Amino acid sequence: TIITHTVQSGLKILAIIHSSPTWAAVESCGPISDTVAFTNFLTATVTRYQDAVDAWEFMNEPDGKAPRDGYGPGIGCWGPYPAHYAQQLQLFYATVKALDPTASVMFGSLAYDAWDFFDRQFLSNALAAGAGPYFDAIGIHYYPIVSSGRAFGALWKRAYHKAAALLGGVVYEDPWLAGGHNGLSNSEDPTKPENPMPRVLALRKLMREFGLGDTPIIMAGGVWWLEEWADWIDNPELG
């Protein structure tokens, strides 16, 4: 499995729990109504994977204000419910720590951007509601997410060249395998998937031109079986 291969490669795994079934929540991206079912699920999951997983994260980008069409429940919509998030983070923390005290628990990593869609005060409000003691770390999604070298070039010129030393990675999200945040250009056909290798090679070439030859490219989605990606691993062209 991908988890076995990841552990054997010496990498550490951060598991994100998100997207509640509709019968357990009013919105799949928001507060959970059936906390008993949630606790049972979390207990079974942590028990099964605790030997492989180093950290557990409660929801992805919970600072979302509302469900977003086209993104699915993977993007949180807890923005109006910071107290609910704090309460259910406490349940999450207690369950994980009871089963694996050495595991880290993460507050859901924040988008902290695009204020029309995300609540800038969500973290402050959740802390005020008592979330503070119930997480070990928090992440901010500040890496650029692109689906082509062309898209990264535009973002680099617009903003990222101003803080190149702080750019710890560039995320590639394939527009056919994983949706792609930046979409397709007019010359690309959404019904005809392209091999991602040339696209990522073009991204790496551009990054080298910008002095980012050693900056990691992070694959977001579309990678399920590492044997299918054997020619990518330790490939010097990709860096």
Image: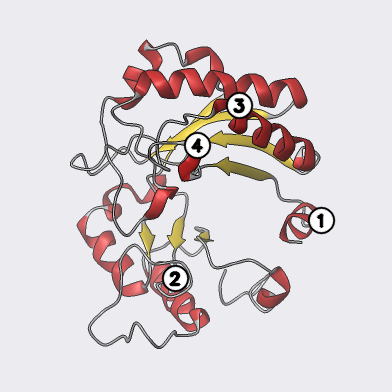
Label 4 SS = helix
Label 2 SS = loop
Relative to 226, is 28 above or below?
above
Q: Earlier in the sequence, mark 1 or mark 3?
A: 1
The type of residue carrying mark 4 is Ala
Q: Quadrant of the C terminus?
A: bottom right
Relative to 6, is 127 above or below?
above
Q: Residue 183 or 40: which is nearer the viewer?
A: 40
| Badge 4 density bin: few <14, some 14–19, many ≥20, Cα 10 Å | some
Q: Which mark is residue 8?
A: 1
Q: Earlier in the sequence, mark 4 or mark 3?
A: 4
Please say whether residue 101 is visible from this viewpoint.
Answer: no
Q: Quadrant of the N terminus?
A: bottom right
| Badge 2 density bin: few <14, some 14–19, many ≥20, Cα 10 Å | many
Disc 1/disc 3 C-alpha distance (Å): 34 Å
What is the quadrant of residue 117 in the picture? Answer: top left
Residue visible at 76% across and 25% down in the picture: 99
Q: Earlier in the sequence, mark 1 or mark 2?
A: 1
Disc 4/disc 3 C-alpha distance (Å): 9 Å
- The x and y percentages for residue 150 are 30, 74
